[in-house]
Amino acid sequence: MAKNIKNDAITSRDDDFAQWYTDVCRKAELMDYSSVKGFIIYRPYGYAMWEQIQQFMDRRFKETGHENVYMPMLIPESLLQKEKDHVEGFAPECAVVTRGGQNELEDPLIVRPTSETLFSEHYAKIVKSYRDLPKKYNQWCSVVRWEKTTRPFLRGSEFLWQEGHTVHATEEEARAETLQMRDVYVETCKDLLAIPLITGRKTEREKFAGAEETYTIEALMHDGKVLQSGTSHYFGQGFAKAFGIQFLDKDNKQKYIYQTSWGASTRLLGAIIMVHGDDNGLVLPPRVAPTQVVIVPIQQQKPGVLDQANKICESLKAKGIRVKVDDSDKSPGWKFSEAEMRGIPVRIEVGPRDLEKGVCVVAKRNDGVKDTMTIDEALPEKIIALMDQIHNEMYAKAEAHLKAHITESTNFDEFGKILDTVGGYIKTPWCGDDACEVKVKEAYQATSRCYEPNEAKEDDVCPCCGKKAKHIIYYARAY
Ligand SMILES: [Zn+2]
């Protein structure tokens, strides 16, 4: 009994990782395609995962003093053009509304690709004095960026996200905010999603359009490719000057504000799938799992079995565990493989023989290990402890994978071989020149993910040009 029934329907990860990913997205019922390319339907199970992420982050945003607002989804083209770098970065992928009702619009409207311009216009109106600062707003919404190649959750023409936008009286405060929100993302990945990260600054080439500084969180997927999973930007006074966001300071002088923005999206769902999933489907970290425990009654028509399953369910529910009984008329084997496909962290089995002994069988999705537990008032606490254990095991496994896929190299010629065989990151000294980044990109189709400024050692040399190195940089092939 309870042998894994192979999910024949999904491709194995080693055969074709891209196909495996698509199979899991569809078969675990996370999403479906719509009739417009790049626009997907978030099905209940996928959306429930996003809701868990939203709840976790929203709580942290509020604890760190932010308020939620909602901005319009349309931006006048003239407004988007106010900050030069920003419009250059986003114009190529904008969706534009040119007609309203029967009339051609004089000033076309952009479907928001991001909302810096709207927030800036609003802040210019409502910030007058140092007493109005800081303003720390966040909005949950979707944005549209017209993409040529699209993949569910990873790259879509529309995606769901949060975008935080803050304005401050001093540079110091704005810089601290940028780092604080980067840290909230790190915490979300570690504590909720069991995903270890590399973080650092984006290079000039890779940073956000209009930002002075972009901090990023980068997650390593199972196939050795990397996914940018959230960014936090320090804008200095660029938008403030373009939009005239000024305040009267305590010293009675008019000054420009300092600004930040930060965003994380439904890409995180893609990260969960590709970091933790296996050949039987999704493997969900317990804290983000919409259903944390599934109870499967064995021979449920036998007297007492279903009652026992329901009793266990109620006792777990009372302790806040997200649990359900699968009492459908499918066979237990079918139910097991369905629960596996959906990545439910814990499965509890109860059958007639367990009933006599007052026990149940508890199976962990992450490694298949099974245990027999006594059904008593201590069971819910044991399951809670087990879920913490699963979270830690999943994090440790992902961390070991990450560590094994950071290769330090100072030889430009071996970059390609490292990327082709080991995959993951190449960690190397960098002189700071854009030309060297381009050289890596053109030779090996790997981009800089982030760098640590001034971390190079005294005698470190940039392997791309042979000049003295300043920084340590990470290159990888990325989604
Ligand atoms: Zn160089």
Image: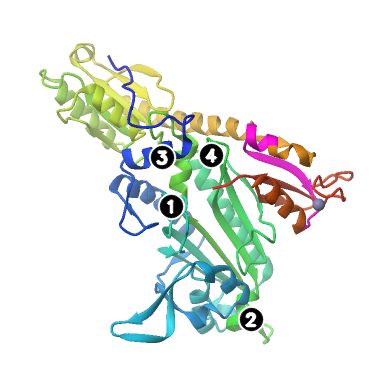
Mark 4 to mark 3 CA distance (whole Å)? 20 Å
Residue type at mark 2? Lys
Mark 4 close to ligand 1, CB under 8 Å:
no
- Write the residue at 77% across / 39% down: 413
Residue type at mark 1? Thr
- Write the residue at 23% across / 20% down: 350
Q: Which mark is residue 287?
A: 3
Magenta residue check for 176: no
Mark 3 close to ligand 1, CB under 8 Å:
no
- Cβ atoms at labels 1 and 4 below 8 Å apart: no
Circle nearer the viewer, 1 or 4 = 4
Residue 170 sits in which quadrant? Answer: bottom right
Query: What SS does tag 4 mark?
Result: loop
Q: Residue tagged by mark 2?
A: 241
Point out the tag, 3 or 1, that comes first from the N-terminus: 1
Q: Residue tagged by mark 4?
A: 221
What segment carries the magenta color?
A: 417-433
Residue 394, x across and y down, in percent = 49, 31
Residue 113 showing in the rendered view: yes
